[in-house]
Amino acid sequence: MSMLASYLTLAAVLFCIGLYGVLTKRNAVVVLLCIELMLGAVNLNLIAFAKYGVVPSLAGQIFSLFAITVAAAEAAVGIAVLIVLYRSRATVNVDEYDRLGR
Amino acid sequence: MPDNVPILSFIVLIPLAGALMLLLLPKDRGRLARISAIVFTGLSLLFAVWLYADYQPAFGGAKYEERAAWLSIPLNLEAGLRDQGVVSYRLAFDYHLGVDGISLPLVLLTGAVSLMAALGSVHIRKRRKAYYALLLLLQTGMYGVFLARDAGLFFIFFELTLIPMFFLIGIWGDYGREKAANRFLVYNGLGSAVMLLAFLLLVATLGFRADETADGTILTYSGNYDVMLANLSDPNAAANAGGALSFTGGLKWSVFVLLLVAFGIKVPIFPLHAWMLRVHAEAPPPVVMIHAGVLLKMGVYGLIRFAGFLLPAQLEAAAPAIAALGVINVLYGAILACVQKEFKLVLAYSSISHMGIVLLGLASLSEIGFAGALFQSVSHGLISALLFLVVGSLQERTGTTRLTELGGLARSLPFTSGILLTAGLAALGLPGLSGFVGELLAFLGLFATMRWPTVLGVLGVLLAAVYVLRSVLAIAYGPLPARFAGLKEARFTEALPMVALTGLIVLLGVYPSLLTDLMEHGFAGLLRELQTRAGG
Amino acid sequence: MRTVFSQYAWLAPLFPLAAFVVLTELNRSLKRTGAFIAIVASLASLALSLLIAFERIGTGAEDYSGGFAWLTIGSVTLSAGFEVTNLTALMLVIVSLVAFLVNLYSLGYMRDDERKSVFYAYLSLFACSMLGLVLADNLLLLYIGWELVGVCSFLLIGFWFHKPEARAAAKKAFIVTRVGDLGLLIAILLLFRYMPGHALDFVSLHNVFDSQAGVISTSITTAIALLLFLGAVGKSGQFPLHVWLPDAMEGPTPVSALIHAATMVAAGVFLVARTYDIFEASAVALDTVAYIGAFTALLAATAALKQNDIKRVLAYSTVSQLGYMMLALGSGSWTAAVFHLFTHAFFKALLFLGAGNVIHALHTQDLRQMGGLGRRMKTTAWTFGAGVLALSGVPPLAGFWSKDAVLAAAFERHPLLFAAGIVTACFTALYMARLFILAFWGRPRGDAALAARAKEAPAVMTAPLLVLAALSVAAGFVQTPFGSWLGAWLSGEAIPEQAESVPVMAASAAAGLLGLYLGWLLYGKGAPKGGGAGQTRPWPWLVRLIEREYYLNEAYGYLFVKPLQGLGRALRLFDGAVVGGAGRLAAGAVQALGRLNSRLLSGQLQTYGLAAVIAAVVLMLAIAGRRF
Amino acid sequence: MIVFHTLTWSDAWYLAPELALVGFALALAVLDLMLPDRVNRDWIGWGTLLGLAVAALFVSWHICDLRRSELAGEPAVRDLLYGSYLIDDFGNLLKLAFLGATALIVLASLGTIRKDEIPIKGEFYYLVLPAVTGAMMMASSGDLITLFVGLELLGVSSYALVGARKRSGLAGEAAFKYVVTGGTASAFILYGMSFLYGVTGSTGLAGISRGLEQAVADYRALVYVAFFLMIVGFALKLALAPFHAWAPDVYEGAPTPVTSFLAVVAKGAAFAMLYRIFVRTVFLADAEAAALREDVSLALAALAAAAIAVGTAGALRQRNAKRLLALSGVANAGILLVPLALDTTILHASFFPEFLYYLLAYAFMNVGAFAVLTVVSRASGKEELSAFAGLYHRAPWTAGAMTVLLCSLAGLPVTGGFFGKLFILFGTVQTKAYWLGAFMLAATAVSYYVYFKIIRQMYMRAGAEEPAVRVPVPAGIVIWLCAAATLALGVLPRPVLDWIDGLFSIGADMLTG
């Protein structure tokens, strides 16, 4: 089980790093990347459970495949949105995206 | 009366029909709107008077009951209940109207004050169509409150008064109208919210009923007032309730306090009165006629109907507290009325003071005290309506109701001043006018159990003389400022309701049996409960 | 003898009521005929009252009562009805007679007033209420009449409403008497609570307090009696609630004669007499009545000495005489009180109406502006003189006999009471002498032109004076120490001759004559030629004290009015700050939450995230804290 | 043990609504590409409507089909692919609601959105279809994977929709914020799901439900972590306070019809997913997992209360109508969450009718209110509250309808909003969750003030001089349809509730498969 624990820990660390990045990074691209990092951490989790879990099963791997695909789609849309935004604002600084809410 | 005339529905729905009809009128036909509103109001009043003529206290209102299943909402009947043989499980609110000795006087009051207010709205010049439509809508709400015999229906009618009032204050009021409308809305909204919680608790406890039928058990949560009363006096009700909430002491007290707060805002009971000052001061006078005349009474009625009849033990135990609140209301309102510089605020505080006497009557727990409370409600309704009718006339002519700016109007407006003086005398409880009877009955009732609160209440009557004379004489007596010399006396349409209301006040003062006879047997159920408690 | 007229006694108040209704409804169209309607109505009342009285004088007629249920609630019935006894019959006559005379008199006095019909309407309403009060068979109905006469008094005091003084006086009269009314109301509440069967009618009261002693405990009885007396104190202008009566002179003079001299102010005496059984059941209450009466009599008599307003002198005199009546009541002789009420009604009405003539002629009420009127207004002067003598207690005028009856009763009760009575009698004569001398003797001191034009009032105004003067002279013979017919008739018991009261009679007569003599010395013979202005006066502080009416108005201002205003202002602050503040606080709390939310919504995405993470951590800690 | 269920043609029939939507989306996309520029892209909108109608038709067919089976005594649920996709009344009812709401939104936007504002008008319309498909999947899935795919399908489509006002910097900002928040929320949910899968070994809800008790016994902490992460994720998705801060920004920046879509359909779908997962796994758990259920309920109740409080209080201070409605949405999300947070007892099992009824009422009033806002802001060029000034004079009938809708939002009788709240409140009373009920009521009272701010603008502010507001016919239809439905739901809730009650039962629709 120690194997599982270490994977889970690694995933948790990755997830937290991703979250931290989302919360602190000023570059919008990095923020998007950090979301991917969080999703990646989850995939690691899924795979670990699929392999070393209580009831090992293929479902976890399938799940992770879906998750990767979906994450890719999301990232694509995210970048597209960012490009549109960059065209009108000429900045990728998250801090400066604050015209709403004023 | 033919037995099958749904007279109560007529009373409630005629104004609604009128409001809808007014909406179809073209915008610029203000005069037509006014006339039709008066006709519809009068029609409703006519039915109310018919009901009054037909009503026999000895038989109660059973004959007029109207009931139709309205909402019967399925609750999820899961396997557990099905296994127990339950075939139907519902939450039911009925369209259930009824009348008795407690509601009939208030229905009559509503009709009278509404008609007078409609007549007295002659100063309203802008957006008349909307104004009169809202006035009619308001009436439906008020009649509905007094006639509804279902907690849900009661609540809906209660809320129905909220929206028209908001608009009436907010569109046709004085300079601070929007603020006043908001405050009205928020306070009363809070009151309604509290009331709703209390009602739902009542429905979930007293309203629960299990009926055995051939097919199986039918479980119903009902807002029906009769069901609640029946459950209250049925010692087996708790056993029948099965897994439902049992109506324990703690819960009863919670409901009682919630009801006290909910209706206390309306009455208003100190310290929940802050909202009504602004309404008195800012709303157009005909609307205040209805507000002070009828809406405050909805609180009294609710207290009697729900807190009283459904929670007699709590009412009994809380009587000293209610008496204390009553005394505070009486004195607090009276003392503050003595130092106001704005006539409308004098009247606002005077309303607080007078409603305190209603509380004193309720706290007496005796028939004479209850009758006094109800009589005082009706009487205060008429008197404050009359006072604000006069205020409306004065305001239109002089442009102010500040005591320091007025004076000597008895010279240029002798008729209006005379009416004002009469109304003032009625407000200070002059015998021969209706105000006296209510106060007397309340005091007679309360004195039997609580001596000192009564004496303090009587002190309020003295203060009433102080603030009434101080303000009325400041307006009518003294030297006449030059700019008020050429004022025109009241028009016929203003004089008519003034005379009518004065007539009613005198009539009730001279021959109160007109009203008290109606109340006979009205409180019988509550008194029986109180007596069995005292006995056992 | 069958009581034929007594059963129609309820009509007596209805005549003036009808007049009131007609007058208020048709107020505009009845400029001249209005007065006649009122006069005819009062005449009808008078006729009925006299018929009833004569019917009752004949034989020992049964008391007659009748009524109906006014209000029934559950088992409690409040009834309204009338009762004719000898006392009420007498009061009916007094009230309707004076009312009729005043109505007649006003025809002249108020001739030029544009609101004459309103005046007559008010007078009619007053007559109705007063007759209702008198006829009432129970305390509640009496209370209703009691309040209504108060309102009429208020309306009539403020009749000239454009005068600020009239407005203030009316307000004061109403509020001060209302203090007493509260006592009456609470007494009624107490009686309602403790009387068997919630009965409030006088017959039951008599039965309970007279014969069934112990049904109601002594302390309650005392409380009831004192509260009833508080009502009487307010209405009858007894110390300390007498302050309204002098101010009430702002009203038209006929009103002062009718309401504030002859009838309404006597209602307090009537009330105590009507409920005398309750007072007899409590020694404390009787003593209170006696001492308050005596003190009031003395106090008011001294205050009357230095008043310069002719009507104020008479007003204080009224207060003083009402004190006499209370003294009699407290001394155990209600018949003496009623007797004095009876005679006082005539001579005081006479004096007021006479004063009215003077005012009508000179357009001033200030004694210092008068003088020498005797020659120009002979009828007035002579009738007024008769009134002065009657009031001063000069034998054998009416006032002498009734005052003697009062003093005799006081003498039996306590020497102190008697002494106060005698001193008051002396002062009474003194201030009346001053009044008469200043007004009618000497030379005109005021506006010479006006004085020159002063002439006797028209017949319609002097005729009532003559009637009243005749009564003031002769009415006393209905009860003398040698034949107390009135007392026997009223109480229904034979009263023995009171030969031992001869010394009292002598003392009383002597006091009156002494007072008159002193008055003549001070103001007639010994008056300085210059008018008395530059004279140095002994005891200036005492004089000022009396002139300012013992500073009672000021004292009440500081004791009640100011504190009430202060309390009101404090509560206004409280209402705004605390009650309103609580609402604002609640609203503020919600607003604060909203503001917090607005602060959060800064537009910075990462701030949002941070808030979410903090919330998540809190949630996690909460769950963990709960379960782990 | 491993049995592969493959998709058969008959299964495809059950997927007909979703397939129809996808088909229409593809067809319309191609059409949009091929049509010349001068053709008005409103036609795409009408096509979208047609697609929605066809899907709704299929759903209705399914409902009747299930009803027939139920009457015949057969199980009233169809499960596809080993329980990963469920055709049951829960899903069908919600699907109908989503489709109806979307149709109303699309109808309202026909004629109100302008090409200069949204250059990609064609895409704007047909992107709605995959979004709804995602929502429907969320309502209908019985497996974490399908649920997640549905969630993301909805998410990704709506990211694009939010940014549809391409030239506006605000729209881009809103879209970016939505992407980041949505992505993070998805990550949280997914992370939670992974733990749930890990401790039970199954991604199917039925399997999870079976394994949960053992899992709680063995790995209590991990189960808690799983639920905690999912709750946080859903709180973000549903914009429950204090996870709500993004909502006003996104709502403000998005085109108004999209805002309306986010507020109603996206939120409803997230709720559907929440219900699916939570009811199936913990809601009826007992024994070992009872404590877990209690904790989850409590956490949800706390979030609901916070959302109600913050949403209402926050709306007090808003001057922008869309932000105000966004915060009102936060409060309403709290209210919608309440039934799920209540205990289920023998006498109280009506959480789904409570939820669905309020969702329906909420859908009507929100779609209607946003439609009015679209019309009004088009006329005045601003989205501030003052845009409503004098609306009574400028468009009396629209003002009347808006009054009805606002009264419903405020919970005044007799409107659907009132009745929905009443029903939920009765649930709180029945389960003795008094504090939650009191909270709701207090917030309701405050919310009067919020919504009457708009009413005040409409009736009490000057505006008589301004020109009349022109209401496009489709928008007018939607506005009045919504107002009428809102009133109908308030006056006669019985038919709807009887209908729901006739179809739905917890045992059949939420616990099988």
Image (tube, rainbow, N blue to C red):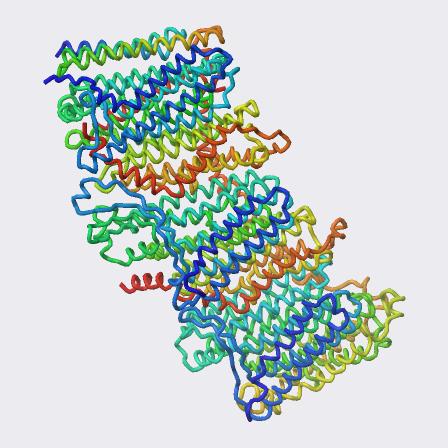
The residue sitting at 34% across, 15% down in the picture is D183
The residue sitting at 49% across, 72% down in the picture is C70
Relative vertical location of residue D194 with respect to residue B67 in this rendering, above or below:
above
Q: Which quarter of the rendering shows the N terminus of chain C? A: bottom right
In the rendering, at what x and y percent does residue D384 appear?
Answer: 53, 25
Relative vertical location of residue B311 with respect to residue B523 in this rendering, above or below:
above
Q: Is residue C178 left or right of residue D316?
A: right
Please name whichever residue, C235 or B433, is drawn nearer the observer in this view of the structure. Answer: B433
Please name whichever residue, D388 or C186, is drawn nearer the observer in this view of the structure. Answer: D388
Please name whichever residue, D195 or D67, is drawn nearer the observer in this view of the structure. Answer: D67
Q: Which quarter of the rendering shows the C terminus of chain C? A: top left
Q: Is residue D404 left or right of residue B151?
A: right
The residue sitting at 67% across, 63% down in the picture is C549
The quarter holding residue C512 reads: bottom right
In the rendering, at what x and y percent does residue D414 appear?
Answer: 42, 42
In the rendering, at what x and y percent does residue C151 appear?
Answer: 62, 66
In the rendering, at what x and y percent does residue B112 appear?
Answer: 54, 58
